[in-house]
Amino acid sequence: MARTRSYCPGWRRLFKRSLKRITSGLIGFVLVLVLAAPVPAQETPQFSVLSDHLPGFTEERSPSPPPSQEVGLKNPQEFENFIDQLVGEEISKSSVPGAVVSVVKDGEIFFSKGYGYANLEENIPVVADRTLFRVASLSKLFTATATMQLYEQGLLGLDDDVSQYLDFALDNPYSEPVTFAQLIMHTDGSTVRRIGLAARTAAEMTPLAEYLPDHMPPIVWEPGKLYGYSSHSIALLGYLVEQISDTPFVQYIDEHILQPLNMQRSTFLQPPPPELADDLAVGYQKQGGQFKPVPYLYLNIAPAASMSATATDMAHFMIAHLQDGRYQNELILQPETARLMHQTHFTQHPELPGTGYSFRERIVNNIRTIGHLGSLRGYSSSLTLMPDRNIGIFVAANGFSGVHGKLLTQFFDRYFPSPDPAPVDSSIDIDPSRFTGVYRDLEFPRHTMAKLSGVFEHIKITGGNNQSLLVQTPNLFFLGNPGQKQLIPVEPNLFRRVDSNAFTSFGEDPEGHIAFAFNPIYPKIGTYERIPWYETIWVQLGIAGFCTVFFLSSSVVWLIRPLIQHRGKRHEKRLNWALNLAGMIGLLNLIFLIGLPLSLWLTGVWKVVYGVPAVAIAFLCLPLIATVMTFTLPVANVIVWNKGYWSLMERSHFSLVTLAAIAFIPFLLYWNLLGFNF
């Protein structure tokens, strides 16, 4: 008797066409979900909630107005015209709804003015001495100042082990303890946490004493060795201020810093008290070319980012720090303590910018500046001090904007110009291959499912001409698109950038291999770790793509098998359960791969700051079930190949599905997606 074909021709053609289209569409869909999180530069990044990165803060020079006839900041009217034009252009281009600028010089307010709207819906303008902005991470400077007040009173030592002041244990596997100085400088070795750092209402906020024991990130680097920015480090510092002073943190800041500085329109309270709440600028994000108001974030890490302030009040704070702790007749710090805060206490190399006690260095036009950046959903801010020139600049906006970087770049080029960088003459021989590879910013969450955000922090370093290196930052992953930078070697592990006088250095591991890149992009302190090839995004996407293809094929085959004509029933009688199991595993993993990112995308990725939504938790159950089922597939593979069950194509496909299911397990573990890691 003639043997019948396994599939009728019509079903076979339909199956092939459908499989090809579905596979192509699914891979494209997964790539879009993974890669499209950074929306175009003018839009608010969907994953940006709390950070210290702002667009425009690179060392790339933008076209600036011609230098002032007199070097230095001297003419208030001329300066006002300059700022009016610059900020006015940003607002007219719809880059930001509203902004405010205050400048202090020689102990006085030199300039203070608001621009645009604090509330677009009600046409409320920004007023410098009335409108409050959430200044995000600039709050850290106040927490650090409070810590230094306790230090000069002898209530704590900067090199003290903070654990002796805590009522819970830090997750520190190293013998080196975490100190106050390390917390202030972000060298404590902790990592980043983004999930659950905020609440939807004031009533849902978690007090520091309850929040930190459960949410303080673990120590992942030996304390004191590397700089790694973490808001939770400063939140812990604020809790220590609370514990040591025996005063609630918000009350302590108000009594010991805000009131002495006459900062009557500033607060760490969330939301601001009734007398200030109506004057808080509405935060906006740009979506589809339109500004949309964002909900108020009630932060559980108040000492790190909850402050709201006017530009005038921030001017008082800048004056106090520039005047060695004094504002008018009030002294918030002893002169030696204020100077201690501003000194460089940590740097990865003497040629690189470092950090003081929360004040971070930038070298702009050969001038040392110290300050901080702030970015909270709907708000952005910056504070820059020029201690040697007794000048301070505060800028805030109620949107995610590059106005800060543009203003400072043009300010320095206009009033404190410097000659173009001299050509770099390198006579040192190096092996560029020692330094090439993919590097990842240290500042990403390592122990939760938010680890996926780390893919947006990759840079690639390749070899260039004449032993130079090229630092590539694809716009696909990077805020502000810093572009490509060329590095010329000047010492064995030290390079100078061709486009500026800035330097980049590299650090070695104990075996002498290059393991870190310091300050490869931004003109502030920063650390990038070299990652192995299998951790690069394209390899990880390749694994995900391979698994997706065979999860799709196995689930499709399983679902349509009852509708297809078969040659016989032999394979249905022998290990039919294995085919069904492979189909179920593929379908479960496929639903997870689509459902989890889709659910987060539809609810708003940034909303994980409130916690992981229930629908996402439900999707996280699927790979747990599939993983348990996967352990039976290798046994079934041995049987079908030894016994010769099924056709060669069916056995090969089954083995590839098994391989995909097994490979998917370490993939999930690497990204903290196997289980409930949040």
Image (cartoon, grey):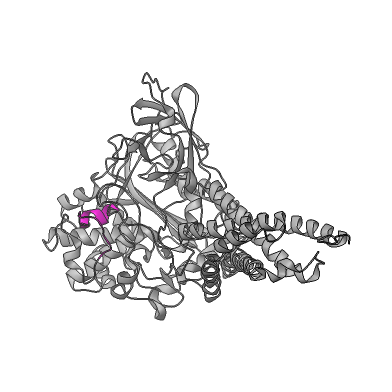
Q: How many marks?
A: 0
Q: Position of residue 83 (x, y in %)?
A: 47, 47
- List the single residue furthest toward the left: 154
Judge whether residue 30 can be spotted in this image. Answer: no
| Image position of 77 with respect to 296: above or below | above
Judge whether residue 625 can be spotted in this image. Answer: yes
Q: Position of residue 609 (x, y in %)?
A: 46, 68
What residue span does the magenta drawing correspond to? 170-186
Q: Position of residue 406 (x, y in %)?
A: 48, 44
In the figure, is residue 277 to the left or right of 237?
right
| Image position of 642 with respect to 351: above or below | below
Q: Quadrant of residue 145?
A: bottom left
| Image position of 270 with respect to 23: above or below | below
- List the single residue furthest toward the bottom: 203
For the point 51% across and 73% down, the residue is: 617
- List the single residue furthest toward the front: 1
Queried whether the magenta region covers residue 182, the answer comes back as yes
| Image position of 273 with respect to 227: above or below | below
For the point 50% across and 46% down, the residue is: 536
Q: Please name whichever residue, 349 or 544, is drawn nearer the observer in this view of the structure.
A: 544
The quadrant of the picture occupied by the N terminus is bottom right
Q: Position of residue 595 (x, y in %)?
A: 61, 68
For the point 49% across and 39% down, the residue is: 460
Q: Please name whichever residue, 58 or 219, is drawn nearer the observer in this view of the structure.
A: 219
Q: Please name whichever residue, 187 or 536, is drawn nearer the observer in this view of the structure.
A: 536
Secondary structure character of the magenta stretch overall: loop
Queried whether the magenta region covers residue 38, the answer comes back as no
In the figure, is residue 440 to the left or right of 510?
right
In the figure, is residue 244 to the left or right of 303?
left
